Image (cartoon, rainbow, N blue to C red):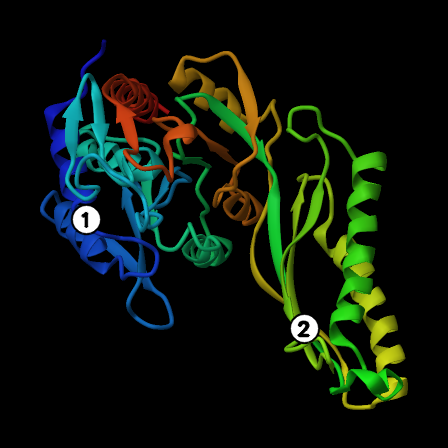
Amino acid sequence: MSTPRTKTVEILRDLIAFDTTSRNSNLDLIRWAEDYLKARGVASELQFDETGEKANLWATIGPADTPGIMLSGHSDVVPVDGQDWATDPFTLSQKDGLLYGRGTADMKAFLAICLSHVEDFTAADLKTPVHIAFSYDEEVGCLGGRQLAAMLRGLEIKPRLCVVGEPTSMGVVTGHKGKSSWRVKLTGHECHSSLTHQGVNAVEYAAELISSIRKLAHDKRDNGPFDDAFDPPYTTVHTGVIQGGTALNIVPKDCEFLFEFRNLPADEIDDMFRIVEARAAELSVEMQAIQPDTGIGIERISWFSGLGTDEESEVVTLTKAFAQSNDTSKVSFGTEAGHYHDAGVPTIICGPGDIEQAHKPDEFVALDQIARCEGFFARLIDWAGKN
């Protein structure tokens, strides 16, 4: 079994100790990383969210006038509430070649590897710069990633390519589905259930719209488009939550439900949403013909872009060389990669750990996975010092 650097494990121990569950601020971790970089002569730029309680970190090592390699990872983790952990989730522990703690796999190991190689980057006289990008709130909608993507769009000199270090067992991933989640609020007209002709039943109209959404899901299942690299190989559509009504003898005034698209990169979310939106408009006309103060409103509550990187592109060729892999794959989970790719930065996903361990109690990353990623970094540094 390959053994990672002691420095990497020590940094990972420090990062795990920060409880950066998405509901919390990530500033303690970001300020720690900022100080770590500053102590090694690297300046950072922070991008704050509208509350000022969360921030992205952006740092460049090497020539600023040359397109560089962006190394990207998110700082937030999912909650441990209700999970049965054998150890403290915010204290790194080691057993049988595995490192346990919340975020070890998803994805603080990659952040630790980035930081442990800062001195290697600065000593390498890089011809191609390296950009370190740490984001906030990936787990709740890629919020920090969207802000970073907006910054990338405005750069005069964009990164040459981006590697998002989500856990892929160091495989090279070129694609994932996008996701868009929607909240639908229906306002009906309340009355006694013996006088249904005077009311507008918000629950029943919700059922009508949900039925249309289900038909759209079946159309995608039966008619595609299809991509056999995904499981399932088509865009999925489903309704997951519905709430409405107060009592059986009252025609319900209010109903709310949530639905989502998980789309192939080649499938347009806007086209699908227009179908749902048009059906909602038809139903609203029916409702308002009975009572004018009724209707249906739809708002998007979260989303991230799909990723579909060309297998023949430079980012894939280089990443395969750094990872010493001849193969590529696509994954079902989402990342910030699609946002960066849409911002004009060719992007892939490649990082240590297994997504099967993410979000679970006793989350872990294997030591040999960290060592493999360090080998990736060594080859990247050698290439960036020559090209």
Q: Amino acid at mark 1?
A: Ala
- The x, y position of residue 333, in whole percent, is 52, 37
| Above or below, comparing residue 14 to residue 283 in the picture | above
Name which quarter of the figure residue 276 lies in.
Answer: bottom right
- The x, y position of residue 8, in whole percent, is 17, 30
- Which one is earlier in the sequence, the residue at label 1 or at label 2? 1
Q: Write down the residue under mark 2.
A: 255
Residue toward you, 35 or 88: 88
Residue 385: mark: none
Left or right placement of residue 208 versus residue 27 in this view: right
Which one is closest to the eye, mark 1 or mark 2? 2
Q: Secondary structure at mark 2?
A: strand
Left or right placement of residue 150 versus residue 126 in this view: right
Name which quarter of the figure residue 321 lies in.
Answer: top left
Q: Residues within 10 Å of mark 1 (few under 14, many from 20)?
A: many
**Whole-Å distance between the Cαs marked 1 and 2?**
46 Å
- Which residue is located at x 34 percent, y 56 percent? 22
Quadrant (top left, top right, bottom left, bottom right) of the N terminus: top left
Residue 33: mark: 1
